[in-house]
Amino acid sequence: MIDSKHRNTALLVAGCFFLENLDGTIVSTGAPRMGTALGVAPTAIGLVVTAYLVTLAVLIPLSGWLAARFGPRRVFLTAIAVFTAASLACALSTSLGWLVAMRVVQGAGGAMMVPVGRLMVVSGVDKPDIPRLISYVVWPGLVAPVIAPLLGGLITTYASWPWMFLVNIPLGAVAFAVAWRLVDDGPGRTAPPRLDRTGVLLTSTGLGALTWTAHLLSDRHAQGTPVAVFGVLSVALLAAAARHLLRTEHPLVDLRTLRIPAFRASVSGGSLFWITVAAVPFVLPLLFQEAFGWSAVKSGAMVLFVFVGNIGIKPATTRLLQRFGFRPLLVTAAAGVVATTVLCGFLTAGTPVALIAALAVVSGAARSLGLTCYQVIAFADVPQERMGHANTLQSTAQQAAAGLGVAAATVALRAGEWVRPGSAYAVAFCLLALVSVGALVGAVRMHPGAGGAVVGGAVVGGAPRSRPRVAPPQGRGELRDRPQPAGTRNDTVTPPA
């Protein structure tokens, strides 16, 4: 049974997740008016988005160590305060340089806010309670990219661009007040080992270079040479970081956590899934506005039907997990995203609006179901002592995938223009669907018992029936017989042959 404190903490982190994701996407809609107000070209506003995303990618790996060193409460409260104050500074900016600088500060707050908050949610709770808690956290993050085009269009049409940042002020103030009363550091914590400075340098610069490469790929005016240079640099730095993290005694992030099969499936398949999820809400408004001739408000309103699907499936997610387990739901969700993404490529201006809305609802349901399952299975078989490393790794992979989503959308559109100039969107959606095919293949190959520690009884014929939890195969180096900390309920049972 989930106590009220854990439930309220999950809802608080959900609100912070919404703010972080909203600020990563809403600025793009207001680029023309922001450029005019700041005296720069609209394309220069892309730097405002990129500065925020790069900062998130660079600093998220530090979140786990900071929470262990200073305590989750102190880091979480500081992150909310920094994010809110930086939002106000962004709204008051009178030059592009100052706005970019404040976006870096805002990104620093966001990088600490959600990963540390999610660690508080999953730490110390019984495994079977994780699905419901994670479902509270996930869906607001899915909602933000969906409503951002509409909200940004409304703000830039009927108000002024600073309001895109001013809306964070009251929300941040409420979040800080609630966190002050609700959050604590939990049971006694131990001091972390000395900070892995080499790991910080290699990991942060590698992720920063990767995010900047994604920005260059999404910039139509970028030259091929800088893209290649930063792409090769990011791969080299991340390879060096992986080599170092696997060899050092106390790494910044323990990559050996990837030996846990369920967690590895979440990071690999979840990243591919998230790339498509982040790309489609970027391409759909462009299709509606450029190809169909719709207004920004109308196209944003149509994309909101994705949100309807997100909300519609949410109450049933936990029951579906208990009834079917992870693999069937992940296969269904990935297949749903593949199918709806391909179908988006066949939409035309003459397609009935009701049919487009129905497609968006189904797409939203598949997105929500898949990401919830990937988030839950990430922590399903992870021992409590590795939860911090798992949370940091999962957060880093998710942020990198979200940043690559927009780049993937832009590259897909360019490829579509090159392959079939008159049908660029059709080609682009089909290419994006291929990314989700990778997630689908991973889900099909997943062990049937993966994540069994968080799945309780199965419902057969309408009546609940307990069932043995099947232990997934242990990866090389995983300690099968190590006793688990009390309260994790990670007591899997291997059925007889």
Image: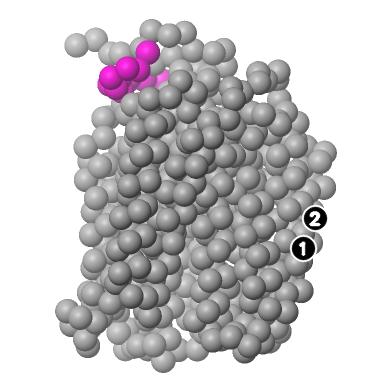
Kindly state the secondary structure of the residue where label 2 is placed.
Answer: helix
Q: Nearer the viewer, residue 312 or 80?
A: 80
The image shows residue 485, relative to residue 79, as above or below, that is above
Task: Determine whether, in the image, residue 346 is placed left or right of residue 315.
Answer: left
Q: Nearer the viewer, residue 186 or 339?
A: 186
Q: In x, y percent, where is residue 149?
A: 53, 75
Q: Residue at x 49, y 46 (%)?
A: 204
Q: Mark yes or no: residue 334 visible.
A: yes
Magenta-highlighted residues: 465-479
Kindly state the secondary structure of the residue where label 1 is placed.
Answer: helix
Task: Determine whether, in the image, residue 104 is placed left or right of residue 255.
Answer: right
Q: Is residue 468 magenta?
A: yes
Q: What amino acid does circle 2 point to?
A: Ala
Q: In x, y percent, where is residue 428?
A: 27, 72
The image shows residue 99, relative to residue 471, as above or below, that is below
Residue named by callout 2 = 173
Q: Which mark is residue 169?
A: 1
Q: Residues at badges 2 and 1 in contact (C-beta under 8 Å)?
A: yes
Q: What amino acid does circle 1 point to?
A: Ile
Q: Which mark is residue 496?
A: none
Q: In x, y percent, where is residue 248?
A: 43, 24
Determine the CA span between mark 2 and mark 1. Answer: 6 Å
Q: Residue at x 58, y 22 (%)?
A: 193
